[in-house]
Image (spheres, rainbow, N blue to C red):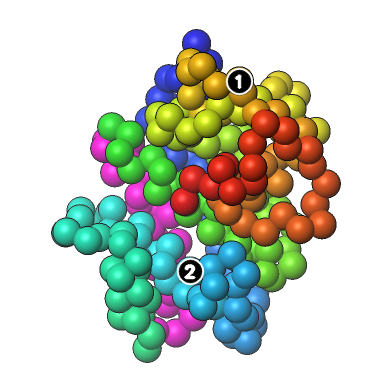
């Protein structure tokens, strides 16, 4: 049994806190013009839009607002629109609060909200990528994020994949490894693996993928 098979209820909150401590100071140091930059990972959304989506999603969890349609594309757009008159600092403040307070709520949800923490971490990578900051889809939270990714793909019966990571000592097994399909094989760095599973651009990044198409890995 691996770490991906046993749920650590504290892991999602730990991932959020780790990312909070890195991302929030970075955002507070950036000029307002950076918040208007377009993102490549989320077409049509600016950096500010991504952050507003992240903060609103976390606050939904904190406040228990799971009405019908919550987290749908339409709901996400409404959440962003509701914050249109906020200052960038207010958006960052709400994001900091959400990343601080959501952990216990996610822990108590029994696993149903764990993917929220993974999604928030990926979106933080989207923002870092646009701003040209190091640590996009990597950084101190990477080990916990990989555990969540492996468990999420396994629970969803995703295609099996064996990943030999250049920057992680142990190989990573993702997806439904109990099925009849021969596992696909990935060789490369962990950040590019995350990009593949998150459907983010990988042009110009060196990796090998055998036994699966890139589009098959996208979990979102």
Give the camera-side residue of 25 and 77.
77
Q: Which mark is residue 168?
A: none
Measured as percent of width and height from the top left, residue 65 is found at 20, 58
Q: Secondary structure at mark 1?
A: loop
Residue beneath the point at 72% across and 33% down: 210
Measured as percent of width and height from the top left, residue 21 is found at 57, 54
Measured as percent of width and height from the top left, residue 34 is found at 63, 80
Q: Using the rendered view, name the quadrant where residue 22 is placed.
A: bottom right
Residue beneath the point at 65% across and 28% down: 184
Q: Using the rendered view, name the quadrant where residue 86 is placed.
A: bottom left
Measured as percent of width and height from the top left, residue 124 is found at 56, 58
Q: Are marks 2 and 1 in contact (CB under 8 Å)?
A: no
Q: Which residue is mark 2?
A: 51
Residue beneath the point at 71% across and 21% down: 170
Give the camera-side residue of 61 and 173.
173
Q: Up-down: is 32 above or below 152?
A: below
Give the camera-side residue of 112 and 183.
183
Between the C-alphas of marks 2 and 1, the distance is 39 Å
Q: Which residue is mark 1?
A: 182
Q: Nearer the viewer, mark 2 or mark 1?
A: 1
Q: Up-down: is 172 above or below 43?
A: above
As drawn, is 148 to the left or to the right of 101? right
């Amino acid at each position: 049994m691996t770490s991906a098979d046993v749920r650590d209820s504290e892991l999602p909150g730990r991932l959020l806190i780790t990312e909070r401590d890195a991302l929030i100071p970075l955002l507070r140091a950036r000029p307002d013009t950076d918040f208007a930059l377009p993102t490549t990972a989320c077409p049509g959304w600016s950096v500010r839009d991504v952050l507003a989506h992240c903060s609103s999603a976390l606050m939904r969890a904190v406040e228990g607002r799971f009405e019908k349609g919550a987290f749908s594309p339409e709901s996400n757009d409404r959440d962003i629109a509701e914050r249109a008159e906020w200052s960038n600092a207010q958006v960052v403040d709400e994001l900091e609060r959400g990343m601080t307070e959501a952990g216990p709520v996610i822990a108590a949800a029994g696993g149903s909200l764990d993917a929220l923490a993974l999604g928030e971490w990926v979106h933080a990578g989207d923002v870092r990528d646009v701003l040209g900051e190091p640590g996009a889809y990597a950084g101190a939270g990477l080990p916990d994020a990989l555990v969540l990714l492996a468990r999420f793909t396994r629970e969803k019966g995703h295609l099996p994949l064996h990943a030999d990571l250049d920057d992680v000592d142990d190989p990573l097994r993702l997806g439904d490894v109990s099925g009849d399909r021969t596992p696909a094989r990935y060789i490369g760095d962990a950040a590019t693996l995350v990009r593949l599973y998150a459907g983010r651009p990988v042009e110009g990044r060196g990796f090998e993928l055998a036994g699966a198409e890139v589009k098959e890995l996208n979990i979102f």
